[in-house]
Amino acid sequence: MTEQYKSNPDDRSDNVEKLQEMVQNTIENMNEAEEAARFSNEKDRADIEAKNQRRLESIAGMRNEIKEEAAYREEQ
């Protein structure tokens, strides 16, 4: 017996809000990591700084995606 698979429609209606929440969560994680770094040894501090740098890059990408999603929403 063959199963039929139906794809879900692309629902982009709340992407901007989800991305904004992701940015906020990432910023909070960065702040918490910076606080932890104050009490960490040199190696752990370097690891935290590297991870926060990657987080900054992710935030930039998410903000670009927010702009794209907002523009898409205005077109609809």
Image: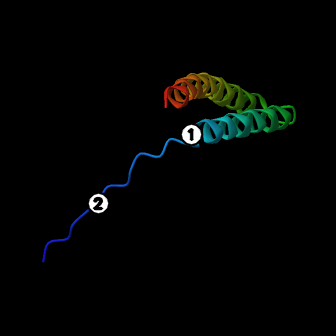
Q: Is residue 44 above or below residue 60?
A: below
Q: Is residue 7 above or below residue 13?
A: below
Q: Secondary structure at mark 2?
A: loop
Question: Farthest bottom residue?
Answer: 1
Q: Residue at x 65, y 39 (%)?
A: 17
Q: Secondary structure at mark 1?
A: helix
Which three-letter amino acid code belongs to the residue tagged 2?
A: Lys
Q: Within 10 Å of the Cα at label 1, are there few (<14), some (14-19), or many (20+) other Cα atoms? A: some
Tell me the number on the disc at residue 6.
Answer: 2
Q: Is residue 36 above or below residue 1?
A: above
Mark before the other along the chain sequence, 1 or 2: 2
Quadrant location of residue 53?
top right
Question: Farthest front residue?
Answer: 76
Measure the C-alpha gap from mark 1 to mark 2: 22 Å
Q: Give left or right: position of 9 versus 50.
A: left
On the image, the x and y values in percent for residue 68 come to 52, 24
Q: Residue at x 59, y 28 (%)?
A: 66
On the image, the x and y values in percent for residue 74 come to 55, 27
Quadrant location of residue 29?
top right
Q: Residue at x 58, y 23 (%)?
A: 67
Residue nearest the observer in this picture, 36 or 57: 57
Q: Within 10 Å of the Cα at label 2, are there few (<14), some (14-19), or many (20+) other Cα atoms? A: few
On the image, the x and y values in percent for residue 37 come to 81, 33
Tell me the number on the disc at residue 33.
Answer: none
Question: Farthest left residue?
Answer: 1
Quadrant location of residue 3?
bottom left
Q: Give left or right: position of 16 versus 38.
A: left
Query: Quadrant of the image for the N terminus?
Result: bottom left
What residue did someone put label 1 on?
15
Residue nearest the observer in this picture, 50 or 20: 20
Q: Residue at x 21, y 66 (%)?
A: 4
Which three-letter amino acid code belongs to the residue tagged 1?
A: Asn
